[in-house]
Image: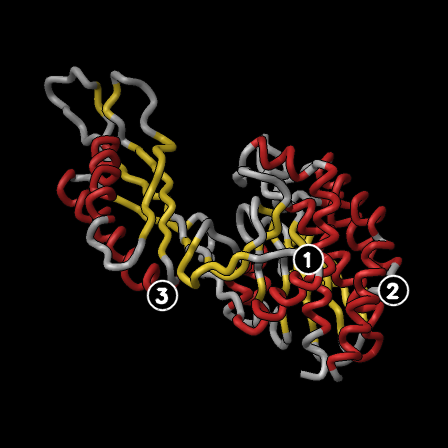
Amino acid sequence: MNHMDKQALKEKIIGIVDQMAPELKQISLTLHQNPELGREEYQASELLHARIKEHGFTVKQNISGYETAFIASKGNAGPNIAFLAEYDALPELGHACGHNLIAAMSFGAAVAFAAVVGERATSYLIGCPAEETSGAKVTMAADGVFDGLRAALIVHPSDDNSIGGSSYATHPLKVTFRGQAAHVASKTDKGINALDALVMFYQGIRTLRQTFTQETILAGIITKGGIAPNVVTDHAEGKFTIRALSSSYLENTVIPAVKRLAEGVALSTGTTVETVHYEPLFQELINDPELMELYKENMALLGEPVTVLESNDAGGSTDVGNVSHIAPTLHPDLRIGKDIVAHTTEFALAAGSDYAQERLLVGAKAMAMTAIDLLGV
């Protein structure tokens, strides 16, 4: 397909998304006003796959053990282009990560792309629950949901238009020390204090962090520290976020060192220790260079300047990283406000603003236009 043909299709994309504006805004605001936590996004999932069916998509539900996951598709030829929808919210904060906008943007892109390519490609809207918690994409990736894709596209709301960068690989640990209970004033039985062991481990984490040769994040909280101040604690637990720039370094260097620290503390305190991953491994995000360049060009066509980040400029963690290790993936940021930070009340307010509802049209257009560039390539 030549350049002129693609330009004509892109103009059609712009027109279709503009025509869909009322529907996309209604989807976004319905999700924003009715936030649902991960694995509980029943209303959001139902709304999305019911609406996508109206545009001629075939929908499969209950994917990879997630009742609220779905795969919607239209077309039966390659290239296979997937637009990833997220729609879970955060406890108490609601849509403070803008997943209501992500769902609407990907919905609009999938519909517009399918409408202009006909049988020349297959458009997918893949509904991905629980990004903020268990990360459905982790299991979906392992189950082969993203195999064979020419591209997987998703746009994240932010305070700037940017592209590139990465995310931290993360594999959180729950660390449990067990000792022996006793009365703190007992003259015959001093017990074995599990909380002392956990505190020693917590303090050791700070020193351990300085020994790694790659950027690493270690932080945690004490989730169980005892039942009463006059009882020697026999059971203490903490949850720890453990992150690194690469999943390989995380799994082969950082986590083994953390576990060795825990075992050393247990040995020195007379306690026993158990370490369990309470969330799956989120791999680091790999933004595909070709998709980055195409997206940047299409944003320019829409009059949107884009900041290009260094490949090791990491922020947060996302299960989109697991997708990017299987299929060429694009995960840029789109400005919906000024000086806003995700996972805050201010961001939640921005995600429901009139301005953000206009901005989501830009994200839908840019993704669908980028997909057009992959036709015949």
- Residue 321 image offset from top left, x and y in percent: 51, 61
- Which residue lies most toward the left here? 187
**What label does residue 303 carry, if any?**
1
Using the numbered discs, state the Cα–Cα distance from disc 1 to disc 2 in whole angstroms: 31 Å
Mark 1–mark 3 Cα distance, whole angstroms, equals 39 Å
Circle 2 — which element?
A: loop
Q: Is residue 235 left or right of residue 354?
A: left
Q: Which residue is mark 2?
A: 56
Q: Look at mark 3 in the image and give the residue it sits on.
A: 248
Graded by Cα atoms within 10 Å as few (under 14), some (14 to 19) or many (20 or more), the crowding at tag 2 reads some
Q: Is residue 361 visible?
A: yes
The tally of labels here is: 3
**Vertically, is 312 above or below 259?**
below
Look at discs 1 and 2 and give the one toward the viewer: 1
Q: Amino acid at mark 2?
A: Gly
- Helix, strand or loop for disc 3: helix
Which of the 4 image quarters holds residue 189? Answer: top left
Q: Residue at x 69, y 75 (%)?
A: 373
